[in-house]
Amino acid sequence: MYSKEVMDHFMNPRNVGEMPDADGVGVEGNPVCGDVMKLYIKVEDDKIVDAKFQTFGCGAAIAVSSMITEMVKGKTLDEAMKISKEQVAEALGGLPPQKMHCSNLGADALKKAIEDYRQKQQASKN
Ligand code: FES
């Protein structure tokens, strides 16, 4: 019932772990199931150059986290802001309908990480 991309990213998740020198961090909880994702980004010249995640969640959430950290690398912050949960699910070859809610975490945690980065930038200018 899972696509081979989902299985691959679940079995061999990319970019797992903490990023102590992250420029932005986003934490998102899934109200449907209580699972939590933390996403770290490293930014240079308005572009995401690296991303990592720590997810306490189901297999689909781990696959979503892994995929989104791959998708954002090299994107500008504005481009990354536009990544939707549907695009992540699509990149994974789809998710079973009852698992679509698991894709919420990725895009939302990413947006929060970008907002966190922007707030820090703003704060450092003041
Ligand atoms: Fe919670 Fe999938 S069951 S994110």
Image: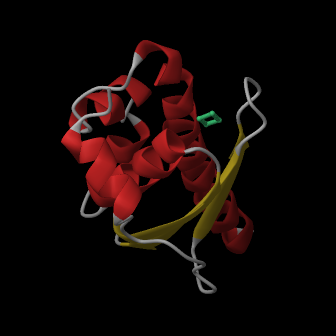
**Quarter the C terminus occupies:** bottom right
Image position of 2 with respect to 100: above or below: below
Q: Is residue 70 above or below residue 90?
A: below
Residue 84 visible in this rendered orientation of the protein: yes
In the image, taking residue 47 as reference, residue 111 lies left or right, namely: right
- Residue 44 location (% of width, % of height): 37, 75
Instruction: Give the residue displayed 32% in from the left and 26% down from the top.
Output: 1
Q: Could you tell whether 58 is left or right of 76 in the image?
A: right
Query: Where is residue 51, by image quadrant?
Result: bottom left
Q: Is residue 125 above or below residue 80?
A: below
Q: Quadrant of ligand 1?
A: top right
**Residue 42: where, in percent of width, then height?**
46, 73
The residue located at (21%, 32%) in the rendering is 93
Q: Is residue 46 visible?
A: no
95 or 90, nearer to the observer: 95
Residue drawn at (37%, 33%) of the image:
82
**Spot occupied by residue 35 in the image (x, y as percentages of width and height):** 72, 42
Residue 102 placement (x, y as % from top left): 55, 31
What residue is drawn where x is 68% and y is 66%?
120
Counting the numbered discs, the total is 0
Q: Residue furthest top?
A: 97
Q: Is 105 in front, or is 23?
A: 105
